[in-house]
Image (cartoon, rainbow, N blue to C red):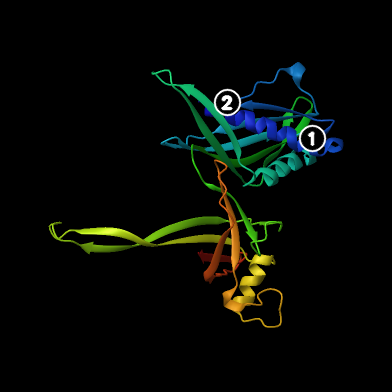
């Protein structure tokens, strides 16, 4: 597939979304978006136009998993900078680590068999910065802005896309979405390995016990999940609602993957919580749950 065309399609759609969210502010301005380069005829130059060029830096392509860095060079509106600056900032804040874009593509192999590939794209953006002011453009001055980002595109990749936390197994309870920084899962099986007569002293194993561990890294913020864990860790008896069962508290999670598969509501117990805190950074908490 043509990744460049797809990324340009996504970027264009997202700029339209940003401008549509505040029509009163952006209604008098237009975006001229192009890929890699832009030539502007004199008759097409308008003080109300914001010119943006997206440049895609060579990235990595491994087994269908693509990393594409992208840079934006934006020439702001004539004799001002507030509109272009806010536009880029709104764009970065809204789509940085936001909801993943996903799409499907169907293709036919040499045996005339039809196949469908699932693509998912994550986006990361930095805040825009001013590169230079007072750039002459006909009879006006303009500000040049610079912003970087990256597209991570996975082909048939199955990352965890959503984690919902519940305080009970009541099906009527509304879950709380966890905004995680990172997540992982580990499934281990304890084997019973024994040697039998006629096996040349080589063992044959039988599965005995399966254990699922689930890890989350989140910011240490005042949420029902964090408040319960803190009350458990520090034996907070004054907070009778956060963790009334102490270390025997039960946690329930539903985990959704990129292909739409959602686990049933799984019961976990907290096995470890670690909260490092570094100067100049917000504290995080690393959580390990075991079923």
* Location of residue 98 (image quadrant): top right
x and y percentages locating residue 58 in the rendered image: 48, 34
Residue 25 visible in the displayed image: yes
- Checking the image for residue 215, the label placed there is none
Q: 84 or 184: nearer the eye?
A: 184
Position in image of residue 236 (x %, y %) = 66, 81
At mark 2, the secondary structure is helix
Give the residue displayed 53% in from the left and 56% down from the top: 183
- In the figure, is residue 25 to the left or right of 56? right
Give the crowd class for mark 1: few <14, some 14-19, many >=20 residues within 10 Å. few
Q: Which residue is mark 2?
A: 5
In the displayed structure, would residue 229 be above or below residue 126?
Answer: below
Neighbour tally class for label 2: few under 14, some 14-19, many 20 plus, Cα within 10 Å: few
Residue at image location 26% in from the left, 63% down from the top? 193
Q: What mark, if any, has residue 20 been given in the picture?
A: 1
In percent of width and height, residue 67 lies at: 49, 39
* Image location (x, y in percent) of residue 40: 69, 21
Residue sitting nearer the eye, 251 or 209: 209
Quadrant of res 73 = top right
């Amino acid at each position: 597939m043509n990744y460049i065309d797809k990324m340009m399609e996504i970027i264009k759609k997202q700029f339209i979304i940003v401008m549509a969210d505040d029509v009163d502010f952006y209604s008098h301005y237009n975006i001229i978006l192009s890929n890699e380069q832009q030539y502007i005829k004199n008759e097409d130059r308008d003080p109300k136009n914001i010119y943006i060029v997206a440049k895609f830096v060579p990235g990595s392509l491994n087994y269908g998993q693509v990393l594409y860095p992208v840079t934006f060079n934006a020439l702001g509106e004539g004799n001002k900078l507030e509109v272009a600056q806010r536009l880029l900032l709104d764009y970065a804040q809204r789509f940085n680590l936001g909801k993943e874009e996903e799409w499907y593509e169907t293709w036919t192999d040499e045996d005339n068999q039809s196949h469908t590939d699932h693509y998912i794209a994550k986006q990361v953006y930095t805040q825009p910065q001013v590169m230079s002011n007072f750039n002459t453009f006909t009879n006006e001055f303009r500000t040049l802005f610079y912003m970087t980002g990256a597209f991570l595109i996975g082909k048939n990749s199955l990352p965890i896309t959503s984690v919902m936390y519940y305080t009970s197994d009541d099906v009527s309870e509304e879950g709380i979405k966890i905004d995680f920084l990172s997540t992982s899962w580990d499934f281990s099986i304890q084997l019973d390995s024994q040697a039998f007569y006629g096996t040349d002293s080589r063992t044959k194993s039988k599965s005995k016990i399966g254990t699922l561990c689930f890890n989350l890294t989140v910011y240490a913020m005042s949420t029902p999940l964090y408040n319960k864990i803190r009350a458990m860790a520090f034996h907070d008896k004054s907070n009778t609602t956060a963790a009334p069962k102490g270390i025997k508290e039960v946690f329930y999670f539903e985990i959704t993957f990129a292909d739409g598969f959602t686990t049933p509501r799984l019961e976990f117990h907290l096995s470890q919580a670690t909260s490092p805190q570094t100067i100049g950074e917000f504290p995080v908490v690393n959580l390990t749950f075991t079923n």
